[in-house]
């Protein structure tokens, strides 16, 4: 590839990831993804058609879940609870920002 | 490159047993957790901690590192001695924290050869996916743009050692991108092994802070200063917005904080977001006799009590 080539990527959400893509992006086995979707811990934002589809929010969530489980040997429900809270704090911080208030 | 003292990074003795190392790691992983930590250099520290743990939690790597480490001091200029790792076999690639791509040159110089060993024979493997953040301006989301990002990436040299190198990528930012969305660049992750395909690169979009605009999803909020008479009597004013200047009608009787919604003028998309102009009433200074006189006339003539609702 020449140095000045311009790379055009795919915007997630316009094109979704499948379970294998998501697993690879999180450096986990596909089974890891399947188990967490079936347990209701991952993929609530996804459009469920014939196969699972994952969007940007799922990718961010899955990476956080995988990191928490790995770093703290957390069980999957506990990791999901922590990620629920992290996401909620993120939403609230976003609201504060939109209201012109600092998060700290 | 500098020699890294992984024991010092985790704050443990060189004789620490495995469970003590694990405990120290978890404590630091909590302290520097990127979503929670308020430490200014949390992300950098977390990378160091991950790297140290990747080595010290792996008996093979730890044994090799210990043999080497007795001869070096932290911060000392370091070159891996040729054949330093003879007699050791590394089964992992340091992927403990989701890929060794984040690790230092020091790590790569020591443990980068695992890839070569595994690449021998018929072994074929797809390269790992990489993740990075890309900072763009709000105008880039409105119009699309091309941005150059510089990434540190692992690469195999001719002798099979993994080295890190900087590479610049020109990336097309699609119009309508939202904060937190990912752009997936196929084949821009780690190279594959034994002829396997390269991994992908995921770029998470973040907007650079802009005091003029606040963004929620595709909706954009912008404060617009107005004069008291524009707010009370109504006026047509010109406002700069991310998509260019627009003429906006301020309705008579507006108070500070009133939101004017410009439908579809947020971040483009299907459906596009809205732009909210938040009115901010700015008082003219009473810095001339004339201005003071006008304020005095208002005070006398308007009989206005701003604290009426407070009951005083």
Image: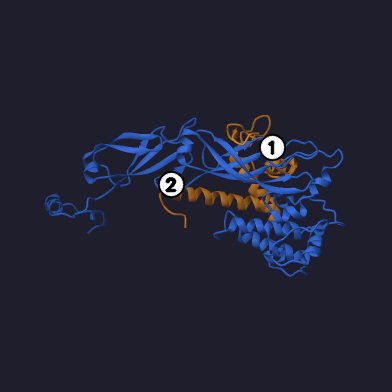
Query: Which residue position holds label 1?
Result: A21
User: Does A61 appear above or below B185?
Assistant: below
The secondary structure type at the circle numbered 1 is helix
- Count of numbered labels shown in the rendering: 2
Q: Chain of mark 1?
A: A
Q: Which chain is blue?
A: B
The N terminus of chain A sits in image quarter: top right
Q: Colour of chain A?
A: orange
Q: What is the distance, in whole Å, between disc 2 and disc 1 at their CAs? A: 34 Å
- Position in image of residue A86 (x %, y %): 57, 52
* Foreground residue among A80 and B260: B260
Percent of width and height locating residue B35: 58, 53
Question: Residue drawn 54% across and 39% down?
Answer: B147
Residue B209 in the image: state x and y as whole percent: 46, 48
Looking at the picture, does residue A47 appear above or below residue A101? above
Q: Nearer the viewer, residue B99 or B171?
A: B171
Q: Is residue B120 left or right of residue B265?
A: right
Q: Position of residue B54 (x, y in %)?
A: 73, 56
Residue bearing mark 2: B210
């Amino acid at each position: 590839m020449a140095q000045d080539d311009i790379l055009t990527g795919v915007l997630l959400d316009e094109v979704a990831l499948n379970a294998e893509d998501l697993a690879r992006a999180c450096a986990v086995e596909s089974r890891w993804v399947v188990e967490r979707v079936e347990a209701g811990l991952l993929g609530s934002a996804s459009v469920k058609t014939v196969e699972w589809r994952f969007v940007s929010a799922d990718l961010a969530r899955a990476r956080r879940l995988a990191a928490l489980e790995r770093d703290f040997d957390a069980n999957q429900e506990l990791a999901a609870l922590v990620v629920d809270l992290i996401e909620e704090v993120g939403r609230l911080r976003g609201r504060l920002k939109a209201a012109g208030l600092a998060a700290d | 490159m500098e020699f890294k003292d992984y024991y010092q990074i985790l704050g443990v003795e060189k004789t620490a047993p495995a469970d003590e190392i694990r405990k120290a790691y978890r404590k630091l992983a909590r302290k520097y957790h990127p979503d929670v930590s308020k430490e200014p250099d949390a992300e950098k520290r977390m990378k160091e901690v991950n790297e140290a743990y990747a080595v010290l939690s792996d008996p093979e790597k730890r044994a090799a590192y210990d043999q080497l480490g007795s001869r070096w001091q932290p911060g000392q200029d370091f070159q891996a001695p040729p054949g330093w790792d003879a007699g050791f076999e590394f089964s992992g690639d340091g992927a403990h924290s989701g890929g060794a791509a984040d690790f230092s040159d020091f790590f790569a110089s020591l443990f980068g050869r695992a890839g070569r060993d595994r690449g021998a024979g018929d072994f074929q493997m797809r390269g790992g996916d990489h993740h990075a953040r890309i900072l763009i301006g709000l105008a880039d989301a409105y119009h699309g743009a091309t941005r150059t990002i510089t990434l540190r990436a692992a690469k195999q040299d001719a002798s099979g050692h993994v080295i890190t190198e900087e590479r610049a990528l020109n990336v097309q930012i699609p119009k309508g991108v939202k904060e937190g969305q990912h752009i997936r660049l196929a084949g821009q992750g780690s190279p594959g092994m034994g002829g396997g395909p390269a991994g992908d690169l995921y770029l998470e979009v973040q907007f650079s802070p802009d005091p003029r605009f606040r963004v929620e999803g595709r909706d954009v909020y912008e404060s617009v200063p107005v004069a008291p008479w524009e707010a009370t009597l109504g006026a047509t004013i010109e406002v700069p917005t991310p998509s260019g200047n627009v003429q906006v009608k301020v309705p008579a009787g507006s108070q500070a904080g009133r939101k004017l919604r410009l439908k579809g003028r947020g971040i483009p998309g299907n459906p596009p977001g809205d732009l909210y102009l938040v009115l901010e009433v700015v008082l003219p200074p009473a810095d001339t006799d004339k201005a003071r006189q006008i304020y005095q006339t208002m005070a006398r003539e308007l009989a206005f009590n701003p604290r009426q609702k407070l009951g005083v």
